[in-house]
Image (tube, rainbow, N blue to C red):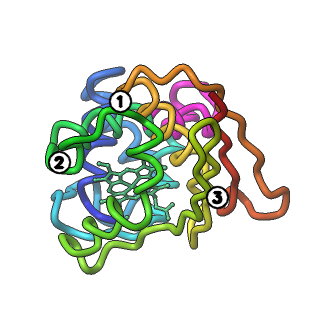
Amino acid sequence: MKGLVFTEFMEMVEDVWSLDMVDAIILESKVASAGSYTSVGTYPHEEMVALVVALSKETQTPVPDLVRAFGNHLFGRFALAYPRFFEGIHDSFAFLSGIENIIHAEVRKLYPDADLPTFEVEASPSRLTLTYFSEHPFADLAHGLIEGCMKYFGETATLQRDTAPDSQGAQARFILVR
Ligand code: HEM
């Protein structure tokens, strides 16, 4: 997993809780990199899982809630860091329907070692279905990123999620209806 996801996660922990909390979860999770992440580095996704589990323990907050909140936060950070992905796009359906063939395709060019999920997209003016497939259990992250995107564009559609029961969070379907 790209280091920028880790650096953004640590910043969120510092902003929402404290620097002491950052230190506490690094100790608690015993991550091999000892928390020294750089945005251009690449680290095992298991370290992200271990950090979130430690944060869950320290804050008594369920892991899925934390990962989803992080997704919301991360979308706002992406919007600041990658303004060119937003040029000429004024609506969440337009943005999200390009997640696979435009956004993550560009991300792959920037970071050839990025380990990105796959989204199948079915779009109509009133309904958008995004089906998430990954090697990693980050459906909650996808959920939060979609919510962050909807907030960013002021989208009023409803969002429904169906998680494949035995996928451990590595597959899910998100349906937006206007
Ligand atoms: C400007 C917008 C976006 C940018 C720049 C971006 C970029 C990235 C990057 C750099 C990663 C890390 C890849 C790695 O770990 O090696 C990532 C992962 C991910 N992205 Fe995006 N992304 C964007 C929007 C979204 C949106 C809107 C969604 C949801 C529909 C999404 C879903 C995910 C998920 C779930 C992962 C975690 C990896 C996994 O599940 O296997 N991203 N993205």
Kindly check if marks 3 and 1 are in contact, taking CB atoms under 8 A apart as contact: no
> Which badge, 2 or 3, is on the more N-terminal residue?
2
CA distance separating discs 2 and 1:
28 Å
Percent position of residue 174, x then y: 66, 46
Residue position for label 2? 82
Residue position for label 1? 21
Q: Nearer the viewer, residue 47 or 129?
A: 129
**Location of residue 122 (image quadrant):** bottom right
Q: Nearer the viewer, residue 42 or 93?
A: 93
Residue at 31% in and 36% down: 22
Kindly check if marks 2 and 3 are in contact, taking CB atoms under 8 A apart as contact: no
- Rendered position, 33 above or below 15: below
Mark 3 vs mark 1: give the one in front: 3
Q: Which mark is residue 131?
A: 3
What amino acid is at disc 1?
A: Met
Q: Where does the magenta region start and end?
A: 55-70
Q: Quadrant of the N terminus?
A: bottom left
Q: Which mark is residue 55?
A: none
Residue at the far right: name it: 165
